[in-house]
Amino acid sequence: MKRNVIIDCDPGIDDSLALMLALSMEELNVVGITVVCGNSPVHMGTGNTGKILRFMNRLDVPVFAGAEAPLKREFADALDTHGRDGLGESFLPEAEGFCPKTGAVDFLAKTLREKPCSVIALGPLTNLALLYEQDQEAFGQMEELVSMGGNFRSHGNCSPVAEYNYWADPDGAAKVYQAMEEIGKKITMVGLDVTREIVLTPDLLAYLRRLNPEVGGFVEKITKFYFDFHWRQEHLIGCVINDPLAVAYFADRSLCDGFDAYTQVATDGLSTGQTVVDSMGFYGKRANSLVLTRTDPVRFFTMFFGRILGTDEKSLDLIPRLVRRETL
Ligand code: BDR
Ligand code: CA
């Protein structure tokens, strides 16, 4: 049975890849996309969502712009990572016929009250924190919340200890983790421990292009800047595509493994945005999170390519060797 899901995102290069994946999955019914300020200002992220929907021929999916600023902190975009247009400086034209609305939080509240629905959050948690402030009952009705963000053993990507989504709005993230504690549910933390394993390499990209020049060419266009950023920043030949793993995991639980824990997000000082995961049970508190720590990149890329290309996974025979970077 298809599961209803709202994707809350800040496109963003890897958010765009995640949207492509989500819209290609027959297990998911994407009932709407809500946009939050993060990688790009919210109007830019909304426009980028339209560009992806146009490419996927899915301009029918409703899109709602949300928070323009974090709960308390000043907004800090990540255009240095995602390019001046938030989409790898691909400068794709705006999508004709794309009619986004405002009111992301109202849309979340209304949908969650109306039907069983989960949320996959791929950006800062501001929209979700505002939902909790506005309508706790609707928040509590969320079937599941899967969030790309945070880190357990991995170092951060915005400070030594903090990951961007939670660093950009630590108060929003802290509120959502606290809210999960209050409603007695668990947020799934798809953090850097697992997403750092998901490296799109030049070889994988070349394979994608060989298999399907249109889709491969599109992915190449929006990721080129991201490849250059990773080379400059991390001395990595490839780019870490964080967000699609959250979507993939939502559809297939066997892709990642982790443990339940009580987690808080630090909101100030040196450790701003850090996920403080009580893996040893110091606080004796009930778990409010499932912290993912292991994943299988071969299986991820097989699913990712298979779905966005609409290809039988069995035919993707080169993926294991390309992911393991074995000489062909
Ligand atoms: C997260 O921050 C953004 O740059 C990515 O889109 C991802 O959601 C990784 O830290
Ligand atoms: Ca994102």
Image (cartoon, helix red, strand yellow):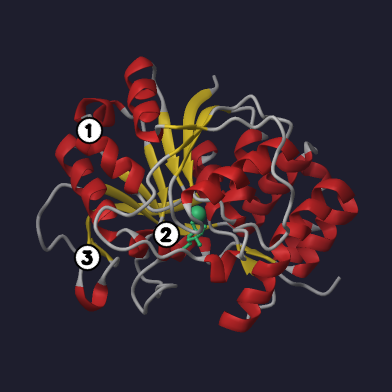
Q: Which residue is mark 2?
A: 191
Residue 114 vs 129, above or below: the answer is: above
Q: CA distance from mark 3 to mark 2?
A: 15 Å
- At 39% from the left and 32% from the top, the residue drawn is 103
Compare marks 3 and 1 and give the one earlier in the sequence.
1
At mark 2, the secondary structure is: loop
Q: Residues within 10 Å of mark 2 (few under 14, many from 20)?
A: many
Classify residue 18 as left or right of residue 269.
Answer: right
**Which quadrant would the C terminus be assigned to in this image?**
bottom right
Type of amino acid under label 2: Gly
Type of the residue with mark 1: Gln
- Which residue is denoted by mark 1 in the rendering? 134
Mark 3 or 2: the one toward you: 3
Q: Earlier in the sequence, mark 3 or mark 2?
A: 2
* CB-based contact (under 8 Å), mark 3 and mark 1: no
Q: Are marks 3 and 2 in contact (CB under 8 Å)?
A: no
Could you say which quadrant of the image residue 309 lies in?
A: top right
Q: Name the residue beneath numbered marker 3.
A: 266
